[in-house]
Amino acid sequence: MEQILFKHTRHGRCLPFDEYRSTGGFEALAKALSEMAPADVQQQVIDSGLRGRGGAGFPTGRKWSFVPRNLAGPRYLICNSDEMEPGTYKDRMLLERNPHLLIEGMALACYALGVQHAFIFVRHGYEQAAENLRHAIAAAHRSGFLGSNILGSTFSLELDVHQSAGRYICGEETALINALEGIRANPRAKPPFPAIKGLWGQPTVVNNVETLANIPAIITNGPLWWKNTAAIPEAAGTKLFCISGHVVNTDCFELPLGMTLGEIIDGPCGGMRPGSRFKACIPGGASTPFFTNAHRDVPMDFDPVAKAGSRLGTGGIIVFDQTTCMVAVTLNLIRFFARESCGWCTPCREGLPFVRHTLERIESGRGEAQDIDILREHVQMLNYAFCALAPGAMGPVEGLLNHFEDELLEHIAERRCPLTGDRAVADRTG
Amino acid sequence: MIPAHLKTDLEQRVAAAVTNREAAVDVMKALQRHYGWLTDEALDEASQLLKMSPLQVEELATFYEMIYRRPVGRHVVHVCDSISCWASGGETLLESLANLLNIECGSTTPDGAVTLLPCSCLGNCGEAPCMMVGEKQYGRVTLEMGAEIVAALRNNSLGISATS
Ligand SMILES: Cc1cc2nc3c(=O)[nH]c(=O)nc-3n(C[C@H](O)[C@H](O)[C@H](O)COP(=O)(O)O)c2cc1C
Ligand code: SF4
Ligand code: FES
């Protein structure tokens, strides 16, 4: 299997700058600066079919094309390394193993976009990643891949690392822009989209770490080669899948997009743990509706996963075995989202704690039949929230209603959790 | 009061920022590292350094999970309570640490050594269950390991050096 992002990976070490150089590192940048116009770089990214790896899967080249070309004043690129979606740790792996790839990818993106000052927004707790990035930026500067007149061209670029202090909403791109500006990180109204009016009111592109780290390979090997590393013709490229839960190998794997869920679980994941049987999984990070045994043949790519009723999201697959109560899983997820709600709009600020409360009642055996209708209603209602956090939060609730209604009914009828029994459910407001 | 060298460092950080506010999180984190938590004094110092009103700094400080606006112990132990850790025994780990420390989750030991807090996903889900002490992360934490880490932190407070 083609390893583009993890090509240099040896567990437990960060790739030295010199080794990155001697194995072809920064050659894509050199090639672009000497042979390609910025518009050519953007065109190759469009041709590759690269879709954003941050969760929404928006086509990257198209996003870049929204930035107005001939405006005076600065424009910005922000690399989103907030990565706080539970079950997701791929950006961390990438940055701990090879920060140079991101820097080269960002330099290429900045060249295409006409950006001279870019930021990397790193979440709290990723101290190693931030340190690797600072070292890598310094090394790139020393070798003339960052700074003024890069490799003798007219292109200049400075990269800054911003370290956050922990809050999931900072990953939402407009909230992230506020966070970077030092404003309370509530999302901004869209439109105007960041590509028109973003950081300090200037045109801004926000891209995920993994998205940007793919750019060098697209430029070096060509968009077609890159696209064809996927497992199915409709998909493009590889994807970092980060696995957690009840399988044998809980690790981060670079796999061709379009492998089926079953192939991933039985292959790289090494199957279920001894004594465990597959019950359900979260296919793409905490905000995506559950998949069950019925979904094992779904190709793990953006459109097929969406067609099957969920989202590829971040590629964070969390696997649950037969001992897991899906009401309890959903409750855990809703507790997270209710706690991380930024509080800006009423449906989310008031609605998520109410949903949490309803699930707590059901899980502890105090649920009523009408609670199921209440949950259903909230799945609809929270679509009217100000940003995508609230509908995302309701993704698992929707999955619970669609695939595990019988489990909900059992809780209500038996007045207890059939799996964890009468264990009290603490009302933790967090 | 913060030492002169820290003040100079932070003044330089603010001077290098695109706008003063951009440096706000860095300044709050540095002051918290110095005081242990973001004290009222630290809040005033931050507001002077950043040329923001204390209320504007407060508005930011109370937003972030890892900025403490209340006193914490010399060590803050965060145990991840998000889904992957939950599925791998994170709840039991948190309970066992609370029992060992003989405190409720969310409070500090009477000797001021350890504050125990739950936290959101640490981005280390493949190594669940996870915890973080200060800025150091631990993965695949068994109950025994958790007990050892906490014991080391307590010993440190009695003057014996910690292992971590
Ligand atoms: C609540 C919320 C949290 C998000 N967190 C992240 C994140 O941590 N990292 C990320 O890359 N994108 C995150 N996103 C998606 C971003 O808003 C944005 O779509 C993405 O960074 C764009 O990058 P891409 O086009 O390369 O995927 C989040 C979105 C929402 C609504
Ligand atoms: S949906 Fe939630 S996170 Fe988004 S703006 Fe409203 S309160 Fe904030
Ligand atoms: S869920 Fe605990 S580290 Fe991600």
Image: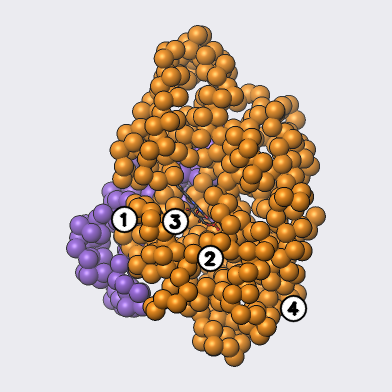
Select label 2 or label 4 by which is in front.
2
| The CB of the residue at mark 1 lies under 8 Å from ligand 2 | no
Q: Chain of mark 1?
A: A
Residue at 60% across, 34% down? A309
Q: In the figure, is residue B47 to the left or right of A252?
A: left
Question: Is the C-beta separation of discs 2 and 3 under 8 Å?
Answer: no
Task: Respond yes or no on whether mark 3 lies under 8 Å from ligand 1.
Answer: yes
- Place residue A367 in its image quadrant: top left
Q: Which residue is mark 2?
A: A64
Mark 2, residues whose alpha carbon is within 10 Å: few (<14), some, or many (≥20)? many
Dot 2 lies on which element?
helix
Residue type marked 4: Ser
The chain assigned the colour purple in the figure is: B
Q: Label 1 is placed on what type of residue?
A: Arg
Query: Distance from label 1 to label 4 (Cα)?
Result: 43 Å
Residue B160: image x %, image y %? 46, 54
Give the secondary structure at mark 3: helix
In which quadrant of the rendered view does residue B130 lie?
Answer: top right
In the picture of the structure, the residue carrying the numbered disc 3 is A173
| Three-letter code, disc 2 | Trp
Count residues near mark 3 (Cα–Cα under 10 Å), then give few for <14, some for 14-19, many for 20+. many
Q: Taking the image as drawn, is residue A151 in sight? A: yes
As helix, strand or loop, the secondary structure at mark 1 comes to loop
> Considering only vertical position in the picture, is B42 above or below A250?
below
Mark 4 lies on residue: A22
Taking the spot 35% from the left edge, 74% from the top edge, the residue there is: B18
